[in-house]
Amino acid sequence: MQLTEKHRPTLDGALEAIRTRAYWSPHPEHPKAYGETGAEDGKAAFDALLNRRFDLDQPGTDDWTGAEVSPYGVELGIQYPHPDLDVLLPAMRAGMADWRAAGPETRALVCVEILARIGARTHEFAHAVMHTSGQAFMMAFQAGGPHAQDRGLEAVAYAYQEQTRTPAGSAAWSKPQGKRDPLELTKTFTPAGRGIALLIGCNTFPTWNGYPGLFASLATGNPVLVKPHPRAVLPLAMTVKVAREVLAEAGFDPNLVALAAERPGEGIAKTLAVRPEIKIIDYTGSSSFGDWLEANARQAQVYTEKAGVNTVVIDSTDNYKGMLANLSFSLSLYSGQMCTTPQNLLIPRDGITTDAGHKTFDDVVGDLAGAVSGLLGDDARANALLGALVNPDVKARLEAASGLGEVALPTREVTNPEFPDAVVRTPVIVKLDGAKPDAESVYLSECFGPVSFAVAVDSTADAVELLRRTVRDKGAMTVGAYTTSPEVERAVEDVCLDESAQLSLNLTGGVYVNQTAAFSDFHGSGGNPAANAALCDGAFVSNRFRVVEVRRQA
Amino acid sequence: MQLTEKHRPTLDGALEAIRTRAYWSPHPEHPKAYGETGAEDGKAAFDALLNRRFDLDQPGTDDWTGAEVSPYGVELGIQYPHPDLDVLLPAMRAGMADWRAAGPETRALVCVEILARIGARTHEFAHAVMHTSGQAFMMAFQAGGPHAQDRGLEAVAYAYQEQTRTPAGSAAWSKPQGKRDPLELTKTFTPAGRGIALLIGCNTFPTWNGYPGLFASLATGNPVLVKPHPRAVLPLAMTVKVAREVLAEAGFDPNLVALAAERPGEGIAKTLAVRPEIKIIDYTGSSSFGDWLEANARQAQVYTEKAGVNTVVIDSTDNYKGMLANLSFSLSLYSGQMCTTPQNLLIPRDGITTDAGHKTFDDVVGDLAGAVSGLLGDDARANALLGALVNPDVKARLEAASGLGEVALPTREVTNPEFPDAVVRTPVIVKLDGAKPDAESVYLSECFGPVSFAVAVDSTADAVELLRRTVRDKGAMTVGAYTTSPEVERAVEDVCLDESAQLSLNLTGGVYVNQTAAFSDFHGSGGNPAANAALCDGAFVSNRFRVVEVRRQA
């Protein structure tokens, strides 16, 4: 088969990378890697999508819907098919037996082909991600393009590996019986998908957070119904279109992947989540709806990434400048609108030891504020780093933040010359006293967006204890720590091991606590309240299919 | 380490077997393989346990309890420690960090040592299983001994493999940055258990159904609290004792494994299941409590084996005698008290084609009844095959069965000369007309015990459709089929693939539909209402731990 020649090396590369956890990616990060006219072609292709119907030619379309407005101020004007579920869902199941019969390798290679075609259109996807999430172009390009494709491919590799743990074809089984003839059977083992998988997309990272579940489910033999966030339909609609094209070309039913766009306020995710046809759900978003899914979608395997309170423990450092630079970048990137952005910076009230001498609590907070201001002092650079606020809720939260405590770094409005209606704001840092009981309700609540709290704690030991309580009760996608003390390092590590949180230690260079690399870093742990699954591990794929055994008298 | 030398080859053998699915076992099935005095030593050791306290020296014992009466009519008279959970549970958590730090290989080898010590005492365990489950001695010996140990070892192998998918020690990560220095990190990946695992044992197969969950949880770094069925405490109490001894000798906290025996009617499983310390639950038993656990023990990963309605489709055969012999054995073994015993035999009302000529529905049912009668005609052989009825509920169900339809094979009381109080009964076969609506409520309900229904269906196509409905709505641990038609074979296979059921085709020799072999056969599929997990696959182990990553600036 042609796909084997074309994509088996990519699959093998991914399988090797998830084993060694070394750096690897087949998806170039640099915009110039996509051909001389890649940038303008991508922009033109994106423009051509605007202000018209996005047809997917899927069965059971009873209406057209769509009201996306770019966080950069532009109405997209795109109408998507609205599904009649009683027609669409049965149609999606129709191709399942053929998809199952194709086997794990063919399914994996078809998935890699879908990713390759998406990859070839990375510029076009970058604009789609930018104008739905509010990410700045370069971030939309990288996180929405190659990094998302990496996470999709990683899921395909895990799915393939998991499904091939039992032999393909038939296995002979012969049990000795002493002097009598042995008992003999032939056995076949078939990975079989569970049923329709529902992907519930998010506003901020439609592709990056969507691809793992989509490809894990598809590669394990399940049809996938994609329910995008109403503000971020386009990147996933484009994905569905590519998937349908590739499936059809490979001789499979294109209805194995379909889109479920919803009317404003329809709440179609809630309806879909409890339909008996839906056997798998992947969800990224608020804890309240994630918790609701876990409690109510009992007929399905539910994988959630919800919200947590990310903490950085600042005990000491031998690279004060590096620490400030690293942290200021993490707080600024995409206006802190990442599920991995640090929220609480725990700093001993007596200050910390650094290579630049002792620094008081106020020194550290002031220097960090200065580092953020420096990083974002230039409007062009600020725009390139911050992107736009994704929605009015984030803006409201940012505006309310100054009332929560002493403002160490006020927010600043940044003008975007290209998109004058974009809402661009620098992050705010608020000082809180960890010992004051009324402060706790502030810093122990998730405050999604460009708001962080510099929390004065009595000691590093206090910080470690607060870290434990935060992860256990509120969850965390990331934990960071800065320390030169092996004891403190060990204490923070123990908390993370006990409470199941992913830890970044003493980052002072070009890797940031809020970024993870597919094939090597786990995103979330699946073991604390922030998420019940990690991207990507065996548990993320192993229950999306079941192995059916047929044994026959040999 | 000594354990490596001793047990690494066993672990490697198990790892190889779960990959190839070929026959393999390190645990001898023959009673004579256990030394010349093995049998009498085992019996003596068992006798020495009776009519006394079974001390485990575990913390938080606030009472002694126990009321086991052997299905063979003997009171065991053993008292077990009753736990004060507020003392015992914290004590169980205390050793968790050391157990985590030991790493996957050491944990696996300690588990293998526990299994090896249990294996050396197989004769003693056989008596304990016999006098709690009612299995006949030989079955208690094999299913409760080597086969249970196999399933435990299989779980250890899966757990080890799953935890070693990320590198032990630290992994280097280096991302090229064009002309600039690469980004470099060192990363460590630590499998970390989730918390205390609760094993809820069953009456019929305390070790066979208990060991997979127990060893999967322990090998993945979790303390395990064993809550046995009140009628089958001894085999699991003995297991707990061995585990505690081995853990202590290997330098770990023995409280990593503990027993929770309950007072009559206490319902301690329900209390334990929702305790926040309990993060994993393994359960074998009724669907009603299994469903309750899945719905209510939301803080835990819940693995259930519940009940289903097992079906055999009888379309045609080229070995009529072999089919009858095979089926009659399956219906008789352990008085049909296996979760895998066939209940509904679907037979076309116009009869079937066989190598012995056309057989009418009545022929087939009559010949099967004759085969069962022949198999069990000799009381000694009947006792050796049937064992005793495990509890009064099964007896009541058997007695009511004759009122459900036309009795094709009546039950017969068998005397057990060694144990005159044992309740030994041969199985009953009841004819039902599948086309009659009132029959459906009979054959579509699980009737656990020595009762099967010969259901007359309009055609094989009808049988296949009824099979589909049965598996989808009621679940099935096993499906069997006899056919010489490739089309029928394909149709039955498709149902099993669609509805996720394990299929045995045309068994006419010494392998039976109700038996599975560890390392090769999956027990249950985890994909239909009879069970949400299969023994044993990646999904059975992958969510019992989480991988915690620590990354550091290189």
Image (cartoon, coloured by chain):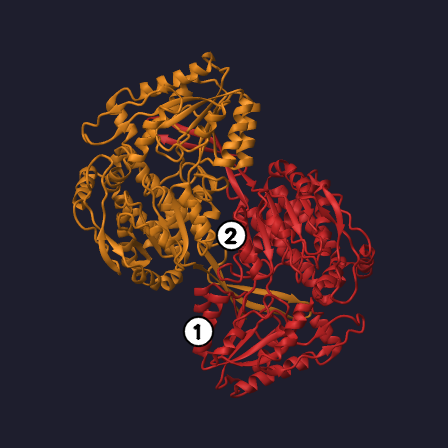
Chain colours: A red, B orange
Question: Between B547 and A301, which is closer to the camera in this rendering?
Answer: A301
Going by the numbered disc 1, the residue's amino acid type is: Glu
Measuring from the top left, give residue B323's x and y in whole percent. 42, 21
As drawn, is A222 to the left or to the right of B218?
Answer: right
* The N terminus of chain A: image quadrant: top right
| Quarter where residue B536 is shown | top left
Which image quadrant is residue A192 in?
Answer: top right
Instruction: Give percent across and percent down for residue B319.
Output: 44, 18
Q: Is residue A498 left or right of residue A148?
A: left
* Amino acid type at image mark 2: Ala
Give SS at disc 1. Answer: helix
Q: Mark 2 points at which residue?
A: A539
- Say which quarter of the image contains residue A512: bottom right
Mark 2 falls within which chain? A
Q: Which of pointers 2 and 1 indicates the residue nearer the eye?
A: 1
Q: Earlier in the sequence, mark 2 or mark 1?
A: 1
Q: Distance between the residues labelled 2 and 1?
A: 29 Å
Residue at figure coordinates x 57%, y 56% from the top left: A17
Task: Identify the element where label 2 is drawn.
Answer: helix
Q: Where is residue A100 in the image (x, y as percent from the top left)?
A: 60, 38
In the image, residue A323 above or below residue B276: below
Q: Name the residue located 71 percent from the left edge and 81 percent from the top edge.
A: A377
Q: Name the mark on residue B522.
A: none
Which chain is disc 1 placed on?
A: A
Where B254 sits versus B156, above or below? Answer: below
Query: On the rendered structure, is A263 left or right of B449?
Result: right
Instruction: Write down the residue under mark 1.
Output: A465
Q: Does residue B104 appear in this view?
A: yes
